[in-house]
């Protein structure tokens, strides 16, 4: 009852506020540019900002301090509402925006303690990094203090103008760097009570570890890897590829990628470029973080995918004495409701995360040991990458990097390519963990931590090709992780790259829209084989024919992809318990494990269930017609889920191709209902290092986070058409609107 009341109060608070404030009136390009401050700025010299037709800025400044300051202005102008929202989310302050419904979320975030190491990190920043960060924050805070019209989020969430601090930038960085393994663990904690848990855990670990490596350290092993890929064995996250100059049509190295994040508006990324005395780069910047995360400079280009490494342990602290626990009390401010008090228990192993309301498991006390709770310096690392001129400077810059763990893919103007596993890992034993929870003695593994330059790297591979897609990296001295993505994407990337003698930009464009899924084909083949000879009526026989004819591509107009998903849902519901399916999906190997289970079932059990599933699927196929009729891209603000008034925050709803493990990832749950994709590919980039201006970027959405701006969603049609925005390293005055900023 209390939970329903809290949800009702939150809906009333937000709904009432939304009804009163309404959305801003439409703003054209001229009005948005006129709102950018150009006079009375605390600048040391002249700064130029060029804005192209898609509101992409390029900042040129005579000093690093001025350049960082204006980048702060730019981020605040384009995304202040988004930045302020994320700032509060990272600190567990959601309830003060939306009301009591979010109190348990805040309590859980406070226990996770994303900003725990922030004060120590800021205190240890090198002088150059500190100066850059402080100048950036000065720009953000200048805009925040002086802008006449605040973004819609301020009125909607009741936000106040609060100056940003350096520790808050670090905490925001930790929010976007959480360990993806947590999603697996938190989904499995409540399953530990089942009698078959030991066997299930071992099976999930074995399946999650069975992932193709991006590269091997043995000489000549890459050829064997490509042979395995081309043989068709396949098995999901971001994609990144690099092509050496010897393998490209232009003769220059190529780099391309599409980071995978939640599909929400505004987009998580800002396309931007800047040139100062120390740095000259273009690429994707995360709102609120003062560096190019993915992009290029005149000498190198870089991208990355989540390494999915084991940067955390869950430690069983149930047997620790009471004096081993320290308690910290915090107050959660709650909008429209009484404030809440939260007790956060710490041990030497980290916070007791099973105290979190959303993570409770009966009788279980587990502490979280996370590398992100220790000081590290990603800000200096990424600034060093932005400035690097060669492989040695690139890899050296990443030595201080810890989270989020990344497989960084590299290309340079000399035609070389490489890959770095950038993270910090404890010196665990090589054997897979026997249990989800580790005994306190496992803390000994964390006494030695390995950094990026102690982990495998690849440079100048014989094949001239590198691809990464959240798959297992090369074998290391210590175990890298246990729950990697399926092999579907990485093997498909290598197969497409190796299909011809040379690779061109046009091939990378096609690659980023590829929607073939080999693991679905393998499961389809098993289903079709076991269905042969079944007595089926006309509609069910039609579904089986669509399955048999399907080419494995999840195109929006594919009837076969729809038939496959519509058949799979009732089939698995009839044969498996819901908790088993949840465990399979938590481990990221649902199709593989479902296939293994189906192959063991006798015909007497499987074939009647399959006949019934094909019959039920016929209704879904008739209802939706094709995959895009069921699988949708719904572009909305997070408030789009509000009842009634939420529809004003839902902007577009259209059929979309792809699935959970296709190169163009559009993730979804296993369902026979019409559904949106909530996670996947939402930004793309390609660079050809033979030309400093040959850089293309596109967002699923737009640059401007201001509600009503003509640039809020103006790149969506480019995205759908497979087109990009060219962003040169040296744009001329004809590139767009030129602003000269002065004091």
Image (cartoon, helix red, strand yellow):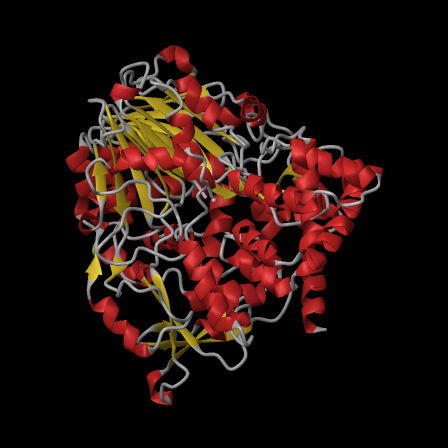
- Check the image and report above or below for 304 versus 711: below
Vertical relation: 344 (above or below) 737: below
**How many numbered marks does the figure carry?**
0
Furthest-top residue in this view: 734
- Classify residue 420 as left or right of residue 55: left
Residue 444: percent from left, percent from top: 24, 72
Residue 562, visible in the rendered structure:
yes
Asked if one can make out residue 70 in the rendered structure from this viewpoint, the answer is no
**Which residue in the rendered view is the most extreme toward the right?**
537
Q: Position of residue 740 (x, y in %)?
A: 36, 21
- Choose top left, top right, bottom left or bottom right for residue 114: bottom left
Residue 558 location, quadrant? top right
Q: Residue at x 31, y 14 (%)?
A: 250
Name the foreground residue: 695 vs 248: 248
Seen as rendered, the residue at the extreme left is: 392
Residue for point 23% across, 47% down: 130
Q: Residue 16: where, in percent of width, then height? A: 72, 53
**Quarter-wise, where is residue 291 in the image?**
top left
Q: Where residue 623 sits: x, y (%)?
A: 80, 38
**Image quadrant where one finds the N terminus:** bottom right
For the residue pair 577 and 546, the one nearer the viewer reads as 546
The C terminus lies in quadrant? top left
In the picture as drawn, the residue positioned furthest to the front comes out as 533
Question: Is residue 621 or residue 94 the one in the foreground?
Answer: 621
């Amino acid at each position: 009852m209390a939970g329903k009341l809290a949800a009702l109060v939150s809906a009333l608070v937000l709904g009432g506020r939304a009804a009163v404030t309404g959305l801003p009136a439409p703003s054209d390009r001229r009005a948005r540019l006129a709102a950018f401050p150009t006079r009375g700025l605390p600048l040391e010299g002249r700064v130029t900002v060029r804005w192209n037709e898609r509101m992409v800025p390029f900042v040129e400044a005579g000093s690093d301090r001025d350049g960082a300051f204006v980048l702060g202005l730019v981020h605040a102008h384009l995304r202040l509402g988004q930045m302020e929202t994320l700032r509060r989310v990272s600190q567990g302050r959601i309830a003060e925006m939306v009301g009591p419904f979010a109190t348990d979320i805040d309590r859980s975030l406070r226990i996770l303690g994303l900003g725990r190491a922030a004060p120590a990190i800021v205190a240890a920043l090198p002088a150059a990094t500190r100066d850059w960060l402080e100048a950036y924050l000065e720009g953000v805070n200048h805009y925040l203090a002086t802008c006449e019209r605040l973004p819609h989020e301020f009125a909607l969430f009741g936000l106040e103008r609060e100056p940003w601090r350096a520790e808050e930038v670090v905490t925001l960085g930790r929010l976007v760097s959480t360990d993806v393994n947590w999603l697996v663990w938190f989904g499995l904690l409540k399953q530990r009570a089942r009698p078959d848990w030991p066997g299930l855990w071992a099976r999930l670990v074995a399946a999650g570890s069975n992932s193709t490596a991006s590269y091997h350290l043995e000489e000549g092993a890459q050829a064997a890897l490509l042979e395995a890929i081309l043989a068709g064995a396949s098995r999901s996250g971001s994609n990144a590829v690099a092509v050496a100059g010897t393998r490209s049509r232009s003769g220059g190295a190529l780099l391309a990628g599409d980071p995978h994040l939640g599909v929400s508006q505004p987009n998580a990324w800002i396309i931007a470029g800047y040139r100062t005395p120390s740095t000259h780069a273009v690429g994707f910047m995360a709102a609120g973080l003062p560096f190019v995360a993915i992009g290029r400079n005149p000498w190198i280009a870089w991208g990355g995918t989540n390494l999915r490494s084991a940067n955390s342990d869950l430690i069983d602290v149930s047997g620790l004495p009471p004096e081993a626990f320290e308690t910290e009390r915090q107050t959660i401010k709650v909008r429209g409701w009484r404030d809440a008090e939260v007790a956060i228990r710490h041990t030497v192993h980290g916070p007791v995360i099973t105290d979190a309301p959303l993570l409770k498991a009966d009788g279980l006390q587990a502490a979280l040991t996370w590398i992100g709770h220790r000081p590290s310096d990603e800000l200096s690392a990424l600034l060093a990458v932005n400035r690097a001129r060669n492989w040695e400077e690139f890899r050296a810059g990443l030595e201080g990097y810890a989270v989020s763990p990344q497989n960084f893919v590299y290309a340079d103007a000399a035609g070389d390519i490489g890959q770095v596993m950038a993270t910090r890992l404890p010196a665990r034993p090589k054997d897979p963990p026997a249990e989800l929870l580790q005994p306190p003695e496992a803390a000994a593994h964390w006494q030695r931590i390995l950094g990026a330059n102690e982990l495998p790297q690849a440079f100048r591979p014989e094949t001239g090709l590198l691809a990464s897609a959240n798959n297992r990296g090369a074998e290391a001295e210590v175990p890298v992780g246990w729950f990697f993505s399926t092999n579907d994407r990485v093997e498909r990337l290598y197969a497409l790259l190796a299909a011809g003698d040379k690779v061109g930009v046009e091939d990378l464009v096609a690659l980023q829209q590829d929607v073939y899924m080999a693991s679905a084909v393998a499961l389809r083949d098993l289903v079709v084989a076991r269905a042969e000879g079944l007595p089926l009526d006309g509609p069910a026989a039609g579904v089986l024919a669509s399955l048999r004819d399907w080419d494995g591509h999840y195109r929006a107009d594919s009837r076969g992809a729809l038939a496959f998903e519509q058949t799979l849902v009732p089939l698995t519901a009839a044969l498996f318990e819901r908790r088993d399916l949840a465990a399979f999906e938590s481990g990221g190997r649902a199709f593989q494990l479902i296939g293994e289970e189906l192959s063991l079932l006798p015909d007497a059990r499987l074939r009647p269930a399959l006949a019934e599933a094909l019959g039920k699927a016929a209704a879904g196929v008739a209802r939706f017609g094709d995959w895009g009729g069921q699988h949708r891209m719904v572009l909305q603000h997070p408030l789009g889920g509000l009842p009634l008034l939420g529809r004003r925050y839902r902007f577009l709803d259209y059929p979309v191709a792809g699935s959970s493990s296709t190169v163009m990832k559009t993730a979804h749950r296993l369902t026979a209902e019409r559904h949106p994709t909530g996670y996947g590919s939402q930004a793309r980039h390609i660079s050809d290092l033979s030309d400093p201006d040959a850089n293309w970027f596109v967002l699923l959405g737009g640059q401007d986070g201001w509600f009503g701006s003509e640039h809020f969603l103006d790149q969506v049609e480019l995205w759908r058409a497979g087109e990009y925005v060219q962003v040169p390293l040296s744009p001329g005055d004809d590139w767009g609107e030129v602003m000269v900023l002065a004091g």
